[in-house]
Each structure stands twice: as C-alpha cells, then as structure tokens.
Amino acid sequence: MVWNFRSDLPIYSQLIEQIKLGIVSGSFLPGERLASVRDMAMEAGVNPNTMQRALQELEREGMVYSQRTSGRFVTDDMRVIGHAKQRFAEEQIRSFLTAMEKLGYTRGEILTMLEEKETEHDNT
C-alpha cells in the first residue's frame, strides 16, 4: 500500500482514512489478515503507537477485528464495508459540489457538465 500524508490532518486520522479506503476499494479483502502493527507502521513511516491508535479506532468502528493470538483482520461484514463505502462516496460528492459552487456553477450547470462528460466517456 502506498501511504500519502498531508500536513492539514493528524497522521492517525489519515491512517484511518487510508486503511478504510483500502478496505472499501478491495485492496484489503474481507477477512484478510493485516500485517502487524510494527510492519504497517514501518511501511507507512510512522510511529507504531500512531498505527496502533488508528487500528484501535478501526476496531471500534467495526472495520477490523482482533483475534488474540492471530492478529488483526479486515471485517467480513459486507454491510459495514458497504456503509463505509457509501460514506466515502457521499463525502466525495459533497466536496465536489462545494468546489464547483465556489467556482460559481449552479447545481443545474454542474449536472449538465456531468451529463456531457458521461456522454463523452461513453463514446470513448
């Protein structure tokens, strides 16, 4: 997994977001065993305590679970994954609409542009 961090959010929040995105996009498969905290932290270039904090939050959210002697695993509850995917999609849409409105476009103009781009995409 490629880890990308921004300076505007705490690292642990970004770890949570990136691991969730990996789960909903299929980079981490349902039921898949995750690497150890230490290995994930080393790969991401962060402190193991920071990675541990992120993974604990993901456990609280039901995205991952621990088995005492076997490590952490991605949830196999497709409902939980589906809800997370829906939340990501809604956030992307809100962000897009806000950016377009800041550029001065109305909702109608945005929809027209989307329809035009969809038609272009279908013709390629």
Image (cartoon, rainbow, N blue to C red):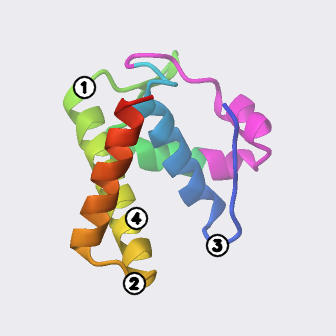
Of tags 4 and 2, which is closer to the observer?
A: 2
Residue 92 x/y as whole percent: 39, 57
Residue 38 in magenta stretch? yes
Please tell me whether mark 4 sits on a helix, a strand or a loop: helix
Residue 11 x/y as whole percent: 65, 59
Q: CA distance from mark 1 to mark 3?
A: 32 Å
| Nearest to N terminus: mark 3 or mark 4 | 3
Q: Which mark is residue 96?
A: 4
Q: Which mark is residue 77?
A: 1
Residue type beneath disc 3: Asp
Q: CA distance from mark 2 to mark 3?
A: 26 Å
Residue type beneath disc 2: Gly
Residue 49 x/y as whole percent: 67, 50
Q: Which residue is mark 2?
A: 104
At x 52% / y 40%, what residue is drawn?
Answer: 19
Q: Which residues are magenta?
A: 30-51
Report whether residue 49 is seen: yes
Of tags 3 and 4, which is closer to the observer?
A: 4
Q: Which mark is residue 8?
A: 3
Q: CA distance from mark 1 to mark 4?
A: 29 Å
| Nearest to N terminus: mark 1 or mark 4 | 1
| Nearest to N terminus: mark 4 or mark 2 | 4
Question: How many neighbours does mark 1 have within 10 angstroms: few (below 14), some (14-19), or many (20 or more)?
Answer: few
Residue 64 in magenta stretch? no
Q: Locate residue 48 relative to residue 91 in the image: left or right.
A: right
Residue 9 x/y as whole percent: 60, 68
